[in-house]
Amino acid sequence: MTATPGHGTFKAGRMRQIYLALAAVGAGAFVYGLLIGDNIRAWQALLVNFLFFTGLAHAGVALSAILQTTSARWGRSLKRMSEATAAFLPVAFGLLLILLLGISTWAPWVDEPIEAKTPWLNIPFFVIRQILAFLLLSGLSLLYVYRSLRPDIGMLDESGERQATGFTKRLIADWQGLVQERLSSQRLQDRLAPGLLVAYAWVLSLVAFDFVMALDPHWFSTLMGAYYFIGGLFVGIAFVTIVAVWGRDHLGLQDYIGRQQLHDLGKLLFGFSILWMYMVWSQYLVIWYGDLPEETEFVYHRMHGAWAPVTWAVIILSFTVPFTVLLSRAVKHHPRGLTTIAIVALVGMWLERFLLVSPSLWHGVGVPLDIIEVLVTVGALGLFGYCYVTFLDTFPVLPVSDPRLTTVTEH
């Protein structure tokens, strides 16, 4: 990748090889679990990571759309780092197809149908709605990212700072000139962003209903959809915080990502940890007061016995630690401290996805968190990492043509 003065430069190189190796290890562990080990553990590990990393991929683009909708200047330098998660969406679609192919193995309602829910929980309708919903949101996300990228690629190509070749050259076909392309890009992003956010909330709610709530067919919660997509935004903010600190230190972006941006990210992490916990409490309180067997079993199972430590770990990592530590203004300004809290939150939210899925599918003794789950997670991380760094290696790291992009001094 050709360096762009003042705009950061990134070479994936060795990192892509490492991520591919991790992906291969995870794929091997999944196949081993299906053919030799306990196949339900392999399926639930894949489902947990599909929910986590696909939610992150969608959330990154949603965060960019939020910045666009609100005309935010403070986070403009973070916009491309958020959009880069969209590179995982084609892989996520492949993972979705694998899950749908194995639905008769891991979905409990296939062998034990509930008559009242069969119009909704039947394989043909399940498969069709999930594929169509994924294509809708992913299509909007990729179109939005394309409209964001096009003027940046063309601007750098036109100025000679970074020649467009191959795939990037095709993205700026029929180039109309920088002034026209910049206006067109902003206008189309302004139109796409609100629709994208509505689709994000709707599609991720559908995912929560089908891939979490339906695993325990007798349980239901009208709050589950909002709970899941708010958690996805929390994951997205934590991830962008880590990447922002890394980009500031390793891509020479100190002029665009300063103490104020880190402080604002810290406030968002703080706020979303509270919002996530509010959703947890709101759901728990209604179930506790209602005291209906079909509602309480889902919660009781996760708060007692072998699953209780996992539940408390989720609350501590996703809420108690971020809330307590980020009360400090100094931590929000400290890159390493902020990164540490973001990593803690990500671990907590992965455990939260695990807690949503596994107790409904696993009927053995103890908590199924062993080598299979770890390696499949490592593989999913490898796939996501490969897609993410490839995106940053291919496209400008900053939205250089965006009229709202400012340096730290200007901000």
Image (cartoon, grey):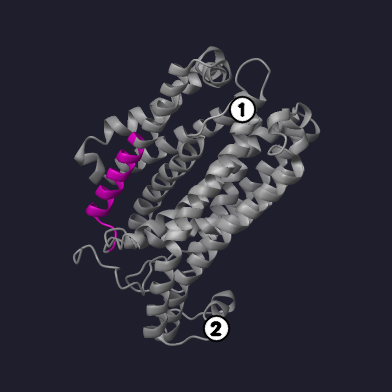
- Residue at image position (55%, 56%) is 137
Name the amino acid type tagged 2.
Answer: Ala
Asked if the stretch drawn in magenta spans residue 257, the answer is yes
Q: Position of residue 79 (x, y in %)?
A: 38, 61
Looking at this view, name the residue that lies furthest to the right: 35
- In the image, taking residue 198 as reference, residue 74 lies left or right, namely left
- In the image, taking residue 351 as reference, residue 338 lies left or right, namely left
The answer to whether 321 is drawn above or below residue 28 in the figure is above
Q: Position of residue 244 (x, y in %)?
A: 36, 53
- Residue at image position (42%, 87%) is 177
Res. 173 mark: 2
Res. 358 mark: 1
- Residue at image position (39%, 26%) is 281
What range of the chain is rendered magenta?
A: 256-274
Q: Nearer the viewer, residue 347 or 295?
A: 295
Asked if the stretch drawn in magenta spans residue 161, the answer is no
The answer to whether 53 is drawn above or below residue 296 in the figure is below
Q: Position of residue 158 (x, y in %)?
A: 43, 86
